[in-house]
Amino acid sequence: ALDSNGNQRLLIVEDDVHMAYLLGYLAEKERFTVEQIADGRQALERIARGDAADLVLLDVMLPYTDGFELLEKLRAHEAWKKTPVIILTSRTREHDAVRALSLGADDYLTKPFSPAELVARIRRRIR
């Protein structure tokens, strides 16, 4: 699902403005076309629209609808079923990681993380 410039599209769902900026900056350096959404309600509308991105960075703690519920909705939607999803969260409890992976996340990264590690994980998912 490349954009008009031949770039892959990355959807970032993150409510923290500084984190969203950092993620967007890293993704654009990797030549992604970035779409950012700051809350769960908007993310639900975006998922329902179809037209899946090539990769999703998904925060767990979001206003209105959390990342786990969004992940379930993504995996239930035909267009998004196979889209790689990397969960980003400040929650470090093991069962959160297990839950994310069992709901269909492809990867899981706890904040704070190193930018280099995130970029490496993004590259691994889009190869």
Image (cartoon, rainbow, N blue to C red):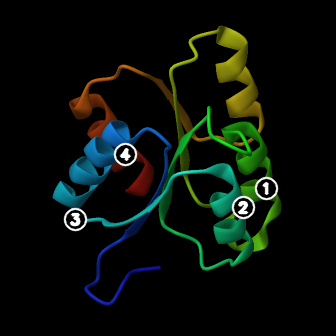
Q: Amino acid at mark 1?
A: Lys
Relative side of 97 to 72, left or right: left
Among the 4 quarters of the image, the one containing residue 16: top left
Q: Which x, y percent locates residue 59? A: 55, 38
Q: Which mark is residue 73?
A: 1
Q: Are the residues flagged by discs 2 and 1 in contact, CB closer than 8 Å? A: yes
Residue located beneath label 2 in the image: 44
Mark sitting earlier along the chain (2/4): 4
Instruction: Give the number of the mark in front: 3 or 4.
Output: 4
Q: Which x, y percent locates residue 106? A: 58, 41
Residue most extreme to the bottom: 4
Mark sitting earlier along the chain (3/4): 4
Mark sitting earlier along the chain (3/1): 3
Secondary structure, mark 3, is loop
Relative side of 47 to 4, left or right: right
Q: Which mark is residue 31?
A: 3
- How far apart marks 2 and 1 lie (CA) works out to 8 Å
Q: Amino acid at mark 4?
A: Ala
